[in-house]
Amino acid sequence: MLDRIRIVLIGTSHPGNIGATARAMHNMGLADLALVAPRCEPITADSVSRASGADHLVHSARVADGLEEAVADCTLVVGASARSRTLPWPMITPRQLGSRLPTELAGEGARVALVLGREDSGLTNAELQRCHAHVHIPTNPEFSSLNLAAAVQVLAYECRLAWLEAAGNPQADDAETPPLASHEELEHYFAHLERTLIAIGFHDPATPRQLMARLRRLTLRARPERMELNILRGILSATERLAPRRNDDPAP
Ligand code: SAH
């Protein structure tokens, strides 16, 4: 999904903002950057330094003469606007934009463009009217204009949040995610827990009062990791060692 979201900067005049935009995008997993009629040289010491290691996005950015060319293949074009214009347009918040993305991008060949304007004058009315909708980042009405790359950061963040939500947090698939306890490990734990609770006189199997069922429910609700279960079993073993030997225990 993120690979089908394009950030389009129109008429940018500060190379530093292009670099900072690349950084904001790369942080959020976006990679498609288009520059429409930049009013500065995109690749400078300033843009590379502000990109902080994401300057490959600046190098790979496509440069276009006009908005049309930059968004030709996009199925949804959203213009980012710092202020309301004379002609009202469908207006969405960054969060609403994010929530629309999974459906918008579900179709074959779907692609979304987020269009941002010039540092000094934003987007022209003609440009804004080429957008399906306008996104406004809610700000202090008396000081509503964000730095260009800061605006990209907010929008890209909402895209990422929506993507994570849609994918059911793909980081759960990450090899670095600690493994959860298996069913078998949980059953060993529950048996150990019951033995220990009996040994310390807390649990009487003759009058169970749903104790084990409740403890199971509690434990299963927590989705313990294998490591966490090992800690709990360590606690049980230490408890067992301290437990008074019961009369009915077999002789050692
Ligand atoms: N001074 C300009 C704003 C320039 S900021 C103006 O008055 O329009 C550069 C770009 O960042 C804007 O064109 C817009 O695309 C984006 N931006 C800045 N603040 C924003 C906000 N609050 N909501 C949405 N986009 C914003």
Image (cartoon, rainbow, N blue to C red):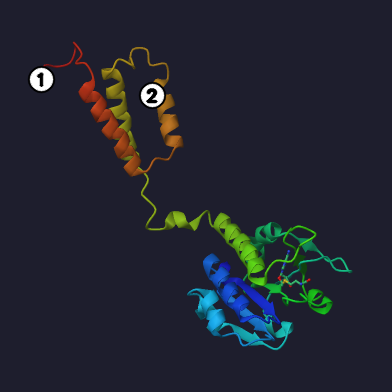
Mark 2 vs ligand 1: CB below 8 Å: no
Mark 1 vs ligand 1: CB below 8 Å: no
Q: Position of residue 136 (x, y in %)?
A: 75, 63
Vertically, is 58 above or below 178?
A: below
Query: Does dot 1 land on a helix, a strand or a loop?
Result: loop
Q: Is residue 75 visible?
A: no
Write down the residue under mark 1: 252
Q: Position of residue 28 (x, y in %)?
A: 55, 65
Which of the pair 105/36 is nearer the observer? Answer: 36
Q: Is residue 40 visible?
A: yes
Write down the residue under mark 2: 212
Three-letter code for the amino acid on which mark 1 is drawn: Pro
Q: Position of residue 67 (x, y in %)?
A: 73, 82
Three-letter code for the amino acid on which mark 2 is drawn: Met
Q: Residues within 10 Å of mark 2 (few under 14, many from 20)?
A: some
Which of the pair 115/51 is nearer the observer? Answer: 51
Rendered-image quadrant of the C terminus: top left
Q: Residue at x 58, y 82 (%)?
A: 61
Vertically, is 44 above or below 206?
A: below
Q: What is the distance, in whole Å, between disc 2 and disc 1 at their CAs?
A: 28 Å
